[in-house]
Amino acid sequence: MCLPQSPESFVQEIGRAGRDSLPAKAISLILQSEVPLRHSLAHTDGISESQIKAFIALLHTKSLQELDESASKSPPTSSYFSSTSYVDVALHMVSTVKALDCKEESIETLISILEEHTYNGSPVLSLEGFLPDSAVVTLKRRTVQELSLIEPVVRCIMKCGFELDKGGENETVGEHSSFRAYSFGSWQFSIVRCTRLLGQYAEPRNVFASLRRLQASGELELSLDTSKSGRAMHLKLHPLAASIFGESDPSVSDSLPNLDQPTQLISSLYARFSQQEKLCAKKVVYIYSILHQISVSDSLTVNEVDSYEAGEVQHAGSSNNFHLLIDQYFSLTDEGKDQAFLAPPFHSKLSVDNRREVQELTADMIMLYREPTLSVNQLTLPFGSESNVDYTARAMAKILHAIDAPRAPVSAWNTHPLWGKWRSYSFQELNRVILSILETSTHFSWIKF
């Protein structure tokens, strides 16, 4: 049931039959209408260049925030950075996904690609894992000042955290009131920041171990934000991350002649994403072409049908044809596959020269731009900004193609009249025409372009 996303997926799926070495049949029941749907979903994880730029800017800001105060008070030098350890940062996934309007899987892909980049033989960054970064400790036996005299981890909490309350009965924290008659106050802090302050070679597990030990001894009560919003990605950024991900500092530029500019890094990341997105879309065409060729071939004679139903034929004509096509697929180059597996058209044509369609699409785009949920409180990557016109076009194309996104989730948009309205056209063509309209149409001159 349902069209697979690629020939590789199809082979893997039908391979589940017969794993016990007994005879098996794999029967595919696929509807023609599934083809454009699967082709549309191939663009789910694709992102615009502006989204990648916003992500790099976020890493730049994070690296600046986490650098030692001594580096910010005086102009940094290459000798300073060479003696400084990697910068630990916590990237909270829920807030990052909302800010960039891309799925968590896309962010993880960006991180994995950046891990391949090196500067002077050292990785630009490394992913250490995921952890609950926000923590609250409630002191039960003594004040935080007293405990900090004997516990290094508590001294770090005092430096990177802030006091929620000073203890005592019926203290109020935010909007919630709690009974703290046996408390000496509570502190909220970041596990990753506490780790950085604990020492150059400290790890979050060392902080967790110290806090668990203090909890077991009755000194404090530990509370971790294990909810989805508290989940964070622990990254180690290169000491020169502020220059790698942002504008190079003039004081160190002379000593860093080979430093890649952020624009080159962004272009490289976008090229990788675009290549992968195109490949995913092509593979849908390949598997559709293979299954279509099998479905229209005169593969079985009358005698073969009788013997096949009787279980006497192991490889009927259609099966042999499938084996030939699959062997051909895995033996051809990418260029050869494009020529050998041409599929019947399954999308309508869309062109900027079609005046009626362009007028209708423009009207739908204006309606989308006026949707308050797409533009409210989006300072990181504003919808409808001149600097993010490529993102705006892609965001509109996703809605018109019924592709789920953080700012336009299917749960909130599936009843909207524009949701999936233009899915009969290919996503690439729709995105291209929308971008052309945004850049040239006078209807959008008021959108700060």
Image (tube, rainbow, N blue to C red):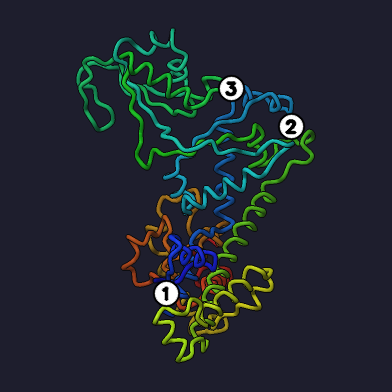
In space, the residues marked 3 and 1 are separated at their CA atoms by: 58 Å
Q: Residue 122 appears in which quarter of the rendering?
A: top right
- Where 235 sits versus 100, above or below? above
**Mark 3 element type:** loop
Q: Which mark is residue 27?
A: 1
Q: Which residue is mark 2?
A: 251
Mark 3: amino acid: Gln
Residue 183, image x, y percentages: 27, 16
Q: Which of pointers 2 and 1 indicates the residue nearer the eye?
A: 1
Q: Which residue is mark 3?
A: 200
Specify the farthest residue to the front.
Answer: 312
**Mark 2 element type:** helix
- Where 287 sits versus 116, above or below? below
> In this view of the protein, can residue 441 be seen by the observer?
no
The residue carrying pointer 1 sits among few (fewer than 14), some (14 to 19) or many (20 or more) residues within 10 Å by Cα, namely few
In space, the residues marked 2 and 1 are separated at their CA atoms by: 67 Å
Q: Residue at x 43, y 49 (%)?
A: 98
Q: Residue 144 appears in which quarter of the rendering?
A: top left
Q: Residue at x 43, y 71 (%)?
A: 26
